[in-house]
Amino acid sequence: MARTDFGPPHYSTLIPDIIKENYGKWLYHEQIRPGVLKHVSETGAELYTVRVGSPRLASIDFIREICEIADKYSKGHLRFTSRHNIEFLLDDKEMVEPLLEELARRGLPVGGTGHSVSNIVHTQGWVHCHSAATDASGLVKSLMDGLYDYFVENKLPNMVRIAVACCLNMCGAVHCSDIAIVGIHRKPPRIDHEKLHKVCEIPSVIQSCPTGAIKPNPKLKSVEVNPDKCMYCGNCYTVCPAMPIADPENDGVAIFVGGKVSNARTAPKFSRLAIPYLPNNPPRWTETVEAVKHLLEVYAENALPGERYGEWIERIGWERFFKLTGLPFTEKHIDDFIFAPTTFRTTTQFNW
Ligand code: SF4
Ligand code: SF4
């Protein structure tokens, strides 16, 4: 019979027996040490989770390596979290220490649980997307190298979720992460008038612009962009390859802070702009790594135990956040120009 159910197998066929047997019966979990969790069931069963950082872009060799480790210590079971941490799931306490020793021998960092920086999530599209303004994987690798101590230790007031998106479409968790880095363009698209009418539908191009910055140019059978209205989103380039926007000299990243998805203690929050622009500086993105480290250090020094990044800022006020971090506050931080006269204080909570 022809197989028609292509796609991933049902998850229940792949999970460890201990999880199947104790489904709905887990009583509590605790962190034994950074990177190692213990879940206890009402049946008395104990599940040990060992969390390891991944390089985000994983080679086949690396996948083979972690599968080999899983075969040896966790009955072939491992999983990737949504932030691409690797988790080995063990039902035998005696295997935890040998696994930790092997991971240390292989140079694989254990951490990412509790009050730490977990693996950094990023949008993968720079590999194929036309709108990317930065190389998300390279930037994340540089950040994770720079934040290694925050991954393997619990030295922050609470967990810190960091995300990178390579363009404003932000198809990652950037809008709701404690610290979020977004690739940005800073110049309007360049129009290839020769090519445009041959490859693009002009009405669709005009319609693609969320700010109405594009109008027809009948003389050239092309379009024009009003630079004052353009917000450099790249949407027009999505529908028209004759309007490229990527620009190695001017593209860079912006850093947002204070978002979270959790509704523990306070409601979920959107991240807000802290640093409008830092240059793309491959291969190590020194400025961005230093800026994120600084944001973490100021948070670690000033937040109360248990406070998430945004909760800390809201308690002390954004004015004080800018003072403590030494970051300049500019007109770019005002997130609502049209309604600013009436909503300035409520939307950004600034006093000046
Ligand atoms: Fe593509 Fe933008 Fe998503 Fe990156 S953030 S993957 S460039 S849509
Ligand atoms: Fe409009 Fe965005 Fe294109 Fe600018 S980049 S012209 S705002 S669609």
Image: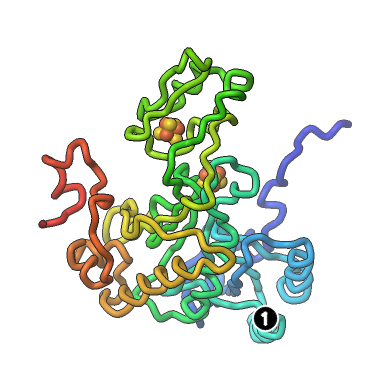
Query: In this view of the protein, which residue sits in the foreground, 352 or 306?
Result: 352
Q: Quadrant of residue 45?
A: bottom right
Point out the residue furthest to the right here: 1
Measured as percent of width and height from the top left, residue 171 is found at 50, 45
Judge whether residue 43 can be spotted in this image.
yes
Kindly identify which residue carries mark 1: 107
Quadrant position of residue 337:
top left
* Residue type of the residue flagged with mark 1: Gly
Whether residue 113 sits left or right of residue 129 in the image: it is: left
Residue at x 31%, y 75% (from the top left corner): 298
Depth check, front residue: 232 or 144: 232
In the rendered image, is residue 262 in sight?
no
Viewer-proximal residue, 136 or 75?
Answer: 136
Which residue lies at the image location 66% right of the left edge and 84% below the top edge?
Answer: 104
Q: Quadrant of ligand 1?
A: top right
Which residue is more in the foreground, 190 or 230? Answer: 190
Picture coordinates of residue 326, whole percent (x, y): 26, 71
Mark 1 residue crowding within 10 angstroms, few (<14) / some (14–19) / many (20+) = few
Q: Tell me which residue sits at (46%, 26%) in the image.
A: 208
**Total marks placed:** 1
User: What coloring was used for the rendering?
Assistant: rainbow
* Secondary structure beneath label 1: loop
> From the viewer's perspective, is residue 258 above or below residue 231?
below
Q: Locate the C terminus by quadrant.
A: bottom left
Q: Residue at x 21, y 36 (%)?
A: 338
